[in-house]
């Protein structure tokens, strides 16, 4: 790529939508600070006020028994493993009560692909959390595809039943890289690219908002990362149902997929190109859970306008040996030190009552 081509692509990124080839050239060739500047320009087009949002919530993993056995996952257990579990109602109740006591507003409710849990069980659990007064942000696309196959139902019908039980939105987990070449190698036993996208389209058609994620830094190419972003952008053009995009790097550790954790520069470059390319997704979330608080803070100047959540509890990333924690006051302090106003939000990016209010 010549200097003139890079300059032309950079100038276009400030004015118009990039096609995948242009995005790839920019991703490969632009220096880090140029990417950061372009991403921050895009960030303020979407969110013009100097506000960074965050949520107070809890990740609840209702079971670690999983048939998928993904190569990158250190969390799953076989059914006969002594550490295998299915969360009982009393434990769920206690976790919800603690979340409420900390002014939490939502539960991120996900688990393994456990064949012993039927759709009725999931409906009951969702209804219980909803009755506690918490928003249920639950069931990633692979879980919903697994339920549909187990019950002999359509994806649409499974989501409809969960919504009627109280499901409020769907997280973007299980996306990894939305390219089947990659998925067949690292997670061959769970939802394909087309199935992941079908779940999200059905959810959007049924009026549920969702997030989207990308786990990068393992066996995929840079081109395949852009393909992933393109799949998200194309679906968003159709439905407008994604509220946020969260890229996070693969965490090697107690799993079978080799590799090294992506460093801060790789993370920031990927975050920035995500903000630049996804010109129809309102929010980009910083991944301080995988990168630590200081890279998370720097991410606020590379296109991110959201710090994610306090994550009162997090198990999946921690199982790979990565443990980063922050409470609400620490998140607020980091946001303010980065030069922004901190605003607590709910799952749908509305300011929380009694929280810090965003500018009108």
Image: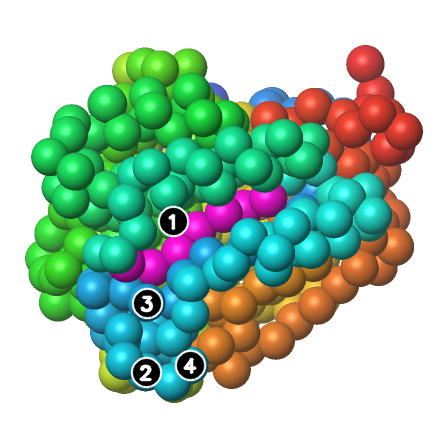
- Secondary structure under tag 1 reads loop
Label 3 or label 4, whichever comes before in sequence order: 3
Residue 112, magenta (yes or no): yes
Mark-to-mark CA distance, 4 and 1: 23 Å
- Secondary structure under tag 3 reads loop
Residue at x 54%, y 46% (from the top left corner): 108
- Secondary structure under tag 2 reads loop
Q: Which residue is disc 3 drawn over?
A: 65
Q: Quadrant of residue 116?
A: bottom left
Mark-to-mark CA distance, 4 and 2: 5 Å
Q: Quadrant of residue 21?
A: top left
Label 3 or label 1, whichever comes before in sequence order: 3
Give the image location of residue 275, x and y in percent: 49, 39
Label 2 or label 1, whichever comes before in sequence order: 2
Residue at x 11%, y 52% (from the top left corner): 180
Mark-to-mark CA distance, 3 and 4: 9 Å
Q: Which residue is disc 1 drawn over?
A: 173
Task: Judge the density around disc 4: few (<14), some (14-19), many (≥20) Cα neighbours within 10 Å.
Answer: few
Give the image location of residue 350, x and y in percent: 69, 23
Q: Name the mark on residue 81.
A: 2
Q: Nearer the viewer, residue 228 or 66?
A: 66
Task: Judge the density around disc 2: few (<14), some (14-19), many (≥20) Cα neighbours within 10 Å.
Answer: few
- Secondary structure under tag 4 reads loop
Q: Are the residues tagged 4 and 2 within 8 Å (C-beta)? A: yes
């Amino acid at each position: 790529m010549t200097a003139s081509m890079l300059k032309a692509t950079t100038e276009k990124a400030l004015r118009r939508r990039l096609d995948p080839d242009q995005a790839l050239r920019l991703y490969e060739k632009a220096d880090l600070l140029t990417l950061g500047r372009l991403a921050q320009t895009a960030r303020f087009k979407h969110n013009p006020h100097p506000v960074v949002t965050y949520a107070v919530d809890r990740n609840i993993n209702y079971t670690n028994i999983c048939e998928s056995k993904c190569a990158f996952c250190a969390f799953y257990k076989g059914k006969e493993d002594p550490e295998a579990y299915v969360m009982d109602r009393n434990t769920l109740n206690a976790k919800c009560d603690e979340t409420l006591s900390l002014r939490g507003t939502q539960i991120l409710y996900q688990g393994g692909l456990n064949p012993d849990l039927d759709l009725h069980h999931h409906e009951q659990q969702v209804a219980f959390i909803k009755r506690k007064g918490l928003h249920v942000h639950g069931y990633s696309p692979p879980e919903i595809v697994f339920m549909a196959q187990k019950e002999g139902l359509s994806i649409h019908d499974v989501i409809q039943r969960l919504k009627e039980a109280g499901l409020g939105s769907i997280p973007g987990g299980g996306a990894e890289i939305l390219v089947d070449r990659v998925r067949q190698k690292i997670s061959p036993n769970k939802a394909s690219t087309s199935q992941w996208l079908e779940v999200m389209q059905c959810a959007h058609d049924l009026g549920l908002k969702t997030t989207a994620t990308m786990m990068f830094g393992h066996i995929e190419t840079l081109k395949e990362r852009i393909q992933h972003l393109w799949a998200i952008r194309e679906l968003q053009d159709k439905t407008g149902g994604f509220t946020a995009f969260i890229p996070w790097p693969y965490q090697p550790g107690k799993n079978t997929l080799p590799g090294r954790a992506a460093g801060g520069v790789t993370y920031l470059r990927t975050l920035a190109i995500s903000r630049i390319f996804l010109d129809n997704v309102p929010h980009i979330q910083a991944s301080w859970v995988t990168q630590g608080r200081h890279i998370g803070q720097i991410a606020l100047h590379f296109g991110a306008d959201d710090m994610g959540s306090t994550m009162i509890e997090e198990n999946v990333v921690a199982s790979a040996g990565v443990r980063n924690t922050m409470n609400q006051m620490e998140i607020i302090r980091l946001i303010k030190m980065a030069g922004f106003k901190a605003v607590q939000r709910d799952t749908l990016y509305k300011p929380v009552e009694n929280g810090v209010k965003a500018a009108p």
